[in-house]
Amino acid sequence: MEVEIARIDPDARLPEYKTDGATCFDLESIEERLIAPGGIALLRTGLVVKTPPGYFLAIAPRSSLHKIGLDKPHSFGILDPDYSGPEDELRLLVRNFTDQPVKVEKYQRLAQGFFNPVPKITWKEIPASALGQSSRGGFGSTGTK
């Protein structure tokens, strides 16, 4: 699948799959930043991605992100097809969960992305009595173990 991408900063590098078996490509920051303990930063990639219609770009933390004291405060990001104007830069949101400052280096790989198809749906409203099964007990009903 070919996807259009624009570098809006000359320092930006295109995302890469780091191994032949990788299912996600890595996303990196183009800026160096010191993130205070408990702080949140929105880091630049210098890229605008034109997500194809019928897809979304999923952005997830790299599995090694915790090793440097960072996580993604919302766990999972979504880039929609209509977020692809010249100022719609893909940015990486990270949070320092430690009690020490964390330094993000320029070109540090912080997230990973993949494209996923998503169908457009229409809603068909029905009465709750027509759902055809009994309730499982609501949110968290399967327990914690």
Image: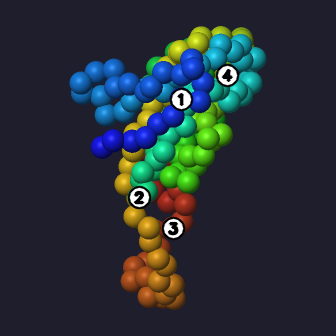
Q: The N terminus is located in which quarter?
A: top left
Residue 20: image location, x then y, percent: 24, 24
How far apart are labels 2 and 3 at the CA level?
34 Å
- In primary-sequence order, the first of circles 2 and 3 is 2
Mark 2: amino acid: Gly
Mark 3: amino acid: Gly
- In primary-sequence order, the first of circles 1 and 3 is 1
How far apart are labels 1 and 4 at the CA level?
27 Å
Instruction: Look at 74% across and 24% down and name the residue there.
Output: 39
Number of the front mark, 2 or 1: 1
Q: The C terminus is located in which quarter?
A: top left
Instruction: Look at 54% across and 22% down and name the residue there.
Output: 12
Q: Mark yes or no: residue 70 visible.
A: yes
Numbered disc 2: secondary structure = loop
- Depicted 26 relative to depicted 122: above or below: above
Residue 38: image location, x then y, percent: 74, 24
